[in-house]
Image (tube, coloured by chain):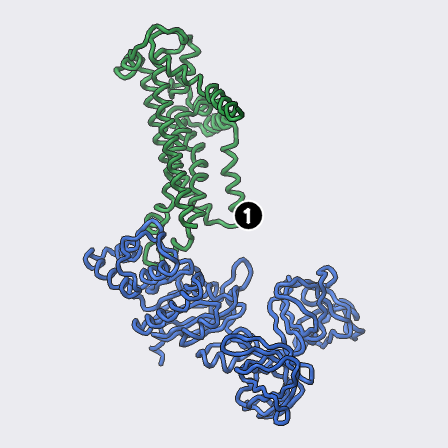
Chain colours: A blue, B green
Amino acid sequence: MKEDCIIKIDHLSKSFSGTKVLDDISLEIKQGEFVTFLGPSGCGKTTLLRLIAGFHTADEGKIFMDGEDISGVPPYKRQLNTVFQRYALFPHLDVYENVAFSLKLNKVPEAEINKRVKKVLKMVSMTDYEERDVDTLSGGQQQRIAIARALINQPRVLLLDEPLAALDLKMRQDMQIELKEMHKKLGITFIYVTHDQEEALTLSDTIVVLKEGRIQQVGTPMDIYNEPQNVYVADFIGQSNIVDGVMLEDKKVSFIGHDFDCVDEGFGNNVPVDVVIRPEDIYIMNNTEAAQFTGVVKSCTFKGVHYEMFVDTAEGYEMMIQDYNPFEVGSTVGMLIKPQDIQVMHKPCTANRFEGEMIDSTHVRFIDGEFECAETSFQAGDKVDVEIAFKKVDLMDDIDEGVVSGQITFLFYKGDHYFLEVKTNEGYTLQVDTQDIWDKNDLVGINFKPKDIKITKRESADE
Amino acid sequence: MKKFFAKAYIWLLLTLLYAPILIILIFSFTEAKVLGNWTGFTFNLYTSLFSGGVSNSLIKAIENTLTIGIIASIFSTILGTVAAVGIYNMRGFRKKTILLLNDIPMLNPDIITGISLFILFIAVGITQGYVTVLLAHISFCTPYVVLSIMPKLKQMNPNTYEAALDLGATPFQAFRKVIVPQIRPGIVLGFILSFTLSIDDFAVTLFTKGNQGLDTLSTFIYADARKGGLTPELRPLMSVIFIVVLALLVVINLISKRNEKTIGHNS
């Protein structure tokens, strides 16, 4: 199995001016695989690709190709080629000269260059364009030339940095099919970067989901879609209902005010979990007798193949449902979820925990702010652990009102409330459950009520 | 009527601007010793200029002007190109600072540049002459080269350099085969600008030429005029220089026109 691995990434980290862009990435890429790095902008996917290409050097960690450490090898000596997002064709050269660039550098005989250029242009369906100025080509044609230019050296690994992002939808779909066929025909490894989850699901053998410089999940498109490992993956891939739940016992989970049978085991009893239900996995019917739970249709929108409906359940949760049949707005409907369609995930954590230090018995310092807390028996200078429940974080519009301030980096609706992540200016991350409506990138002030700050003695504080 | 006045105004303006040059041009075709006297049309001054009928020191001055111009523009073009690429790759505060430092010498009055270089050469102990004039010219031309190349670099897709590395070019090969061709119009513009600035310069040259009798055209003419009367052959010479500069100007304009066209094309 080991010799199958062409690229191995070993505990790779990279920072740009103090901000950690990649944090301890380890990954193995198999020979001939189509791997996609998927994530929102700023997740580090392009940086990871550029590290593999050699345009950046890692702060920590190593990259191996065929078992050989290539971390210090400059890009022009690496046996891989890149297709850039904005094509990066050489504007002063025509199509032929662009494609022949690397062969001419290597002093390959003219006759062979000619043969190989013709062959690779034929592969990207750009025969007869040799003499054309690259500026006169359309975006799609330029991208084909960029691919031809990268492939002419017969690299063993092709890196593609959002190659289709600049193309219109129709062209993008055509190119997706062509890329997939090209990959099959060539049998070389493709490493593909995109923020488009649909593209990733269509093209990839393996998807690597990244968020803020960390790998969230590695798996086949089916795995990633059907069995997301955490709420971030579930939220990023496809549409989903994400709600809080409690694992009552093996194969029994409670959420949206009802108990459901499921297929998951091994979480323990009465453990808080996140539950993901895909909108197409909720069965909706007029009959409320046989239903597991009921609700009132709030909206119904035609989406081409299916209807998308939002239903308010009797217990006050909002569920998104997709079905081939429309249901009348205002009507009462019954709903049903099959055990295998319930995806139960560990909660990464259930409360915000920080290390802090007491200022006096009623004030504590943590996340670079000083907060008032309920009377404690601790003394000034005591090292403590501070815990704040997700629900107990107060966010306010006026950033000066808060003790510390931050920006909302991530949010989604959890059926009856919003879950958000706030990154403070000092770089701490807080997770918040709130009824208030915020937008991504909103600047907020942060404070806690004294009674909501739970303080415990830090175990290792003595050393 | 309005149109007539508008036209008349522009012609009056152009006449006033070009009258002095026109006078030199007209009087280059007459032999009179004193400028302003017309003693009949003749090419004699031109033949005398090109057949060596003028003093050796004038010929030497022309030679100096041309060689200093060419050598200074070659060196400043190389230095300026390398500097521009370096500055282009900088980020944030450092880049802004260096660009500002690059702009200051261009805004600085020539006389101050001349005097400070004069003091510098004395302080360092370099004998003033051909070499110091050359160094001075390189130093004041280089910022203009940087300035004329920066826009071309900004237009460039930065990924093309990386694409070249990716395709197996060493950094130097990538610079030569991918960056230089893309910024070539800027380099050519910088070279021509340097050359015209160098042959045009008077103040800086005067302060850095030393007292070994080195003269460029501008300092020669200045000295000649002060000695009492302009050598008549200077009139055809100045006419020729004017025509050459005019030609260079047309070339510069054509280059920038072509640049605009390619920009328009890309967008």
Q: Amino acid at mark 1?
A: Phe
x 57%, y 85%: residue: A282
x 61%, y 71%: residue: A411
Q: Is residue A67 visible?
A: no
Which residue is more in the foreground, A221 or B169? A221
In-image side of A301 versus A51 (left or right): right
Image: B260 above or below A288: above
Which residue is more in the foreground, A55 or B5? B5
In-image side of B81 versus B6 (left or right): left
x 40%, y 65%: residue: A171
Which residue is more in the foreground, B62 or A364? B62
Residue B119 picture location, percent across and down = 49, 26
Residue A189 picture location, percent across and down = 35, 71
Image: A89 above or below A371: above
Q: Quadrant of residue A408?
A: bottom right
x 57%, y 88%: residue: A337
Residue A178 picture location, percent across and down = 35, 69
Element carrying mark 1: helix
Residue A75 picture location, percent across and down = 37, 60
Determine which residue is flagged by label 1.
B93
